[in-house]
Amino acid sequence: MKSISKSCSLLMDEFSAELVDLTDYGKRAKNGKLTESQSRDLLSHFEATHELALNVITQYFKEIGKGPFSGSRDLTVEAFHAELIDDGKAWLDIVIDRIQYSPVYEIDTQEKFLDNIQKRYIRLLQRFEDTMGKKLNE
C-alpha cells in the first residue's frame, strides 16, 4: 500500500476537531428541545463534519490511486467497499437527508434530520474517525 501524505492527515485533524464540536452540540441537544438557533448550529456543524469526512475519504482514495468519483453517493459506496465506513446504508441515509433538507425542496425534514444526527449520525462519524485513524497509522 502506498504511504499516505501529510495532507490526508491534516484533513483528518480538521475533521476530528469539527467532530468534537459536533459531539458537544449533540450532547447539549439531548438535554431538551432545541431552540431555532441551536438547531441551526447543530445542522451547520453536522454538515461541516460530514463534508470534512468526505474530503478525507476523497484525499485518501486520490493518494492510493482511486477515483475520481462523480459525487458523494459514489464516494460513500466506494468507502464502504474499502471498509473505511462500516454502515454503507446509514451513510447513504446521510446523503439523502442532506439532499432532502436542502432549501430547494418544500418538504419539512428538519426535525427528522436533527433526530437522525443525534441518534445515528454522530456515532457513524465517530466510528469513521476510529477506522480512518487506524488506516492512516498503518
Image: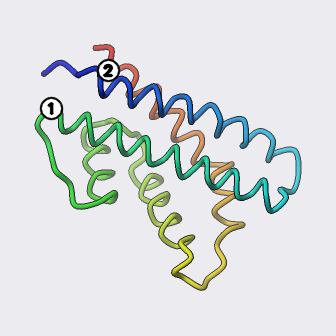
Percent across and percent down for residue 110 are 67, 68
Tell me the amino acid under the disc marked 1: Ile
Please name the colour scheme applied to the rendered image. Answer: rainbow
Percent across and percent down for residue 102 are 53, 72
Instruction: State how far apart marks 2 and 1 are (Cα).
Output: 12 Å
Q: Are marks 2 and 1 in contact (CB under 8 Å)?
A: no
Q: Residue at x 74, y 57 (%)?
A: 39
Q: Residue at x 45, y 25 (%)?
A: 13
- Residue at label 1? 64
* Sooner in the amino-acid sequence: mark 2 or mark 1: 1
User: Vertically, is 69 above or below 101?
Assistant: above
Query: Quick check: 50 left or right of 62?
Result: right
Percent across and percent down for residue 79 are 30, 43
> Which of the 4 image quadrants contains residue 60?
top left
- Residue at label 2? 136
Query: Quick check: 26 left or right of 100?
Result: right
